[in-house]
Structure formats: structure tokens, C-alpha cells
Amino acid sequence: MIIMSQLPDYVASAVPNSQENRAGWLMTTAATYAGVMLWFVFWQQVPMGGQGIAGGTLSQGLGLAIGSLILAALICHLLFYLAPGMLGMKTGLPLAVVGTSTYGVTGGFLMPGLLMGLLQFGWLSVNAYFSGLLLVSIGSVAEGSTIHLLVSTIWALIAMFMGIMGIQYVGKIASFMPIIPIAILLLLLVKTIGNVGIFSVEKMLQAASEVAPESKPITLYGSGMLGVLSLMGAYVIGFFATAGAAGVNFGCGNKDSKAVQLGGLVGIVLSTVFTGVIALLVVAGSQKLAIDSGQTVLLTECDVTKLFSLILGENTAKICMFLLAFAAFPSACFCTFIAAGCTKTSFPKINQWVSCGIGCAAAIFLVIFGYAKDAPAVFGVIGASFGPICGAMAADYLLAGGKWAGPRAGFNPAGWLSWFFGFIVGGIGMVYPIFSGGAALPFEIPCPPLSAFVVGFVLYFIFAKVGLQSKVLDLPQRIDRQ
């Protein structure tokens, strides 16, 4: 038995969520994840995989694009969410505490808890940038203009204020917000479904070669098919990675393992497939409209929101843009709310207005200097950061026999080493050009977030087996780890 003072306050004072306080999976876990995957910033770029590459995920046909989307959604559920969700359900404890088994009670101070909080401001920047863009697009204001950046800055500041002071009011309307993107997606589908059958990859690639000759179809190891699988996986999994680790917090509210499974299958898999498939069908179905109207440049964009006017007409398109921005506001508020909770846990003596103010300033910096507009790059950083975290947590969970091992002393070497190498693998494609004078990586990492997960999982397992785990500490409170 250890001395209780060896445990930091955030672990020693943790109180498990009781069974009496847990609710049904449909309106908690499933609804929360569905809200994440219904965010327009995610589904608007599914057809292009977030990259300016000819054809995007549609470059090898609609069937492969849909298949790769379904595979990516299942990977998110099975690999990135399930172990964290089970850990949350079995312990009733939040991510910051559960993560101490993988990274130690000292290391857990930084990861995954604080890292989760810091990355929320990256999400805030993306939300503010694209929501602001939709709003100013109504008045035909150019992207990146002073007005656009000003609107996005104000958006971030209001979201920070509401996230700290008025989250209870935001929460009251947040549950109704998914209705808006669902209705808009279905409207787009109805308008374009009749032309899906005549979609032609060749026409799309021809248009791309005419508009941007330097843009080439995706290839990975000489195969366009593997390229689509990797591109779709990197986009979807990179977007989802932090939400997977947050499954610990969602699992705290689930009553049993069946609820964890169903919450993920409906909230993650079904929602991802619903939004992503409709986005793919809409882009495929709008091809004829673009050709008939002489706007073939739209065939190379594969960005759903940029097709609104073509599909719906100017007036209806503006209404939809406003509604989508409005529906995204609660997500921006929740980013600040989550960040405030994580920073308060890590730095209890620092006023949350100070910590969140600094984070919001960083988010505004990303907006003003254009980093936030590169959503795939943000997803890439998130995937590289949380891929190995989810992998190590899954390995730790399995090594402990399907339960929580308990908090470990100090910095757990197995966790930190596996994260370091996993992050290198997942992020090398972004880091290498910085240190090579802009030269591209001479080889390709297939689906970087998934590769990072695999490295984190395998290395944690190996390091644990060779004894690179710090000792498990006793808790002053009773925790059911089974």
C-alpha cells in the first residue's frame, strides 16, 4: 500500500460516476458522436479527402469511395473508441484519470488530459474559420478577406465566453442542432440523386487536368485503389481521433458493455456512413449540373458546400449556409468547455479565463494566418497525436485482462515511448518538409493516423512485456476495475 500523498489531487479525489447517474446510450453516447460526425466541416470534404488532388476519394469510382468510408468508420469504432469506451464504463472515471494507467500519474498530468484540452483550441480555430466563411459567403465576401477573418475572430470570442459562462444555455439547444445538417443533406440528395448513375470518373479527371494541369490522381505505391483507402482513412480517422479517446468520458455514462457498443455503432459508424455517403452521392450527382452550366471547375473541388448554389440556387444556398453555421456554434462552445475542464484539472490554481483566453488567442492566430483553413492538416496533427494514444490505451486494456490496471507511478515509460514513436510515424509527412527545405517525404506512410495507432499499440505491448511499466499505485477510493 502506498502513501496517499503520492497521488496527485486530480487522481486521489476522483469520484466514479455511479450506476444511478448513468443514462441510456441513444441520447447520450450515440447522440454526442452523431453531433460530431454531422458537423459540416467533416462531411463537406469527404469526397475530396481533404486534399486538393484530382478526383479526391472519387478518383477510383463511387463504389470504392463508399467502401473505404465504411471501412474507416468501422476502424474508428473498433480500434479508436471501443477500448476507451469500455474503460470509461467499467471505472466511471474521466479520461484524465483513466489515462494514468498508460502514462503514469505524473505523465498523465500532460497526456492525454492536457493534450486533449490544448487540441480543443485547434478545433475552435477550424470551427471559427469555416463557420465565418459560410456566414460571409452569404454576402459574397471573399475567403480570407478582412471581413471574413473579423467575423471568425468574433465567432471564436463569443464561443469562448459561452463555453465558460453559458454552456447550460447552449446545451439546451444543442440536442436539436443535428436536425439542421440532416435536413440539408437530405435536400441535397433529393436534388442530385437522379444523376448519380451517370457519374463519370473520366470526366472528373479530365476537368481537373484542364483546370489544374499539375493536379494528379492519387497514387500510393503505384495503386490508385490503395491511395483512395489511405486518403479516406487518413481523413476520417484523423478527424475522429480525439473523439475516440474521449470515449472514456462518454463511457462513464453508459450502464453496460452493450450500451458502449450500441452507442458507438449508431453514433460513430452509422452517422459517419450517413453523412459521408450522402456527401459522395451529392458530388457524383452534381457532375451533370456542373457540366451543363459550364462550371466544370466545380468538378475538381469535390467540396459539398461549394456546390450549394449550383444545386439549390442562390437564395436557398444562402439560407442553408446560415443554418449550418448556426448549427456549428454549440460545437465551438463545447470546445472551450472541454478545454476549460482539462486545463482546470491540470492547473487548478490558474483562472480558467486566463488559460482559455490564451488558448482562444492561439485559435484566433491560426485563423488570421490561414492555418485553420487547412482542416486536413489539423486532422493530421490530431491523428498523429491521438493515434498512438488510442493504440497504447487499447494495448494496456488488453494486457490488464479487459479492465483498468489502475494509476501507475510517475511517467510510465511504455506509454511515453510508444507515443513518441507513434507520433513520429503519424506526423513525419508533416514534419519532414519543415526540416528538409520543403522537400516531400521520399516515401509514403499509408493512412498515417492508423499507422500511428498500430505503432503505439505494438510498441506499448512490447515495452510492457519487457518490464518498461512503472508500478501500479493503490487508490484511496474503491474503484471497480472489472
Image: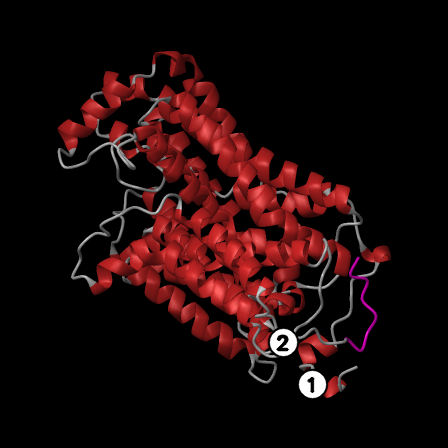
x, y percent for residue 450: 46, 47
Camera-nearest residue between 85 and 102: 102
Where does the magenta region start and end? 475-482
When asked about the image quadrant of residue 267, the answer is: top right
- Residue 166 in sight in this render: yes
Residue 481 in the magenta stretch? The answer is yes
Q: Vertically, is 191 above or below 473? A: above
Circle 2 Cα neighbour tier, 10 Å, few/some/many (<14 / 14–19 / ≥20):
many
Quadrant into which the C terminus falls: bottom right
- According to the picture, the residue beneath numbered tag 1 turns out to be 6
Work out how far the residue at label 2 is from the one at label 1, CA to CA, in angstroms. Answer: 9 Å
Amino acid type indicated by mark 2 = Val
When asked about the image quadrant of residue 280, the answer is: top left
Tell me what residue is drawn at x 52 percent, y 45 percent: 327
x, y percent for residue 52: 26, 40
- In terms of secondary structure, where does tag 2 sit? loop
Which mark is first along the chain, 1 or 2? 1
Tell me what residue is drawn at x 84 percent, y 56 percent: 19
